[in-house]
Amino acid sequence: MEFFREGAENHPEMLEAVGRYFPTFWNQNTKWLAVDLQPSRNNRVMLIDTMANEPFREAYVSFDCFMADMIRANKENIGLKCFNVN
């Protein structure tokens, strides 16, 4: 199954996501955190914002960095670093 295919039908700018990014978390609105499935990208985690002018932004260089930030955010009871970037 290729994720994001249905959305790309109505939003051509999302075509890059089809078959490349695996969605892991959704804010139930317009944003996703997704793992990059391209082997050369070390499973980086992307922030995908369907309402942004540039919908794809690297949130973490690897899934390991994402997990470390999730653990830190949980322990400190604060948000993920990827959401604190302007």
Image: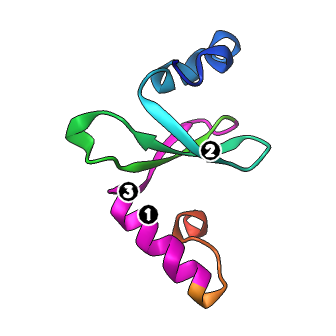
Using the numbered discs, state the Cα–Cα distance from disc 1 to disc 2 in whole angstroms: 14 Å
Rate crowding at label 2 as few (under 14), some (14 to 19) or many (20 or more) other CA atoms within 10 Å: many
The kind of residue tagged 1 is Phe
Q: Secondary structure at mark 3?
A: helix
**Nearer the camera: disc 3 or disc 2:** 3
The kind of residue tagged 3 is Phe
Percent x, y of residue 66 = 44, 63
Q: Secondary structure at mark 2?
A: strand
Looking at the picture, tell me which residue is in the foreground, 28 or 59. Answer: 28
What residue would you read off at disc 2? 32
What residue would you read off at disc 1? 66
Using the numbered discs, state the Cα–Cα distance from disc 1 to disc 3 in whole angstroms: 5 Å
Residues shaded magenta:
51-74
What colouring does the structure picture have?
A: rainbow
**What residue sits 49% from the left and 21% below the top?**
18
The answer to whether the residue labelled 1 contacts the one labelled 3, judged by CB atoms less than 8 Å apart, is yes
Residue 4 counted in the magenta span: no
Give the mark nearer the N terminus: 3 vs 2: 2
Residue 66 counted in the magenta span: yes
Which disc number belongs to residue 63? 3
Q: Secondary structure at mark 1?
A: helix
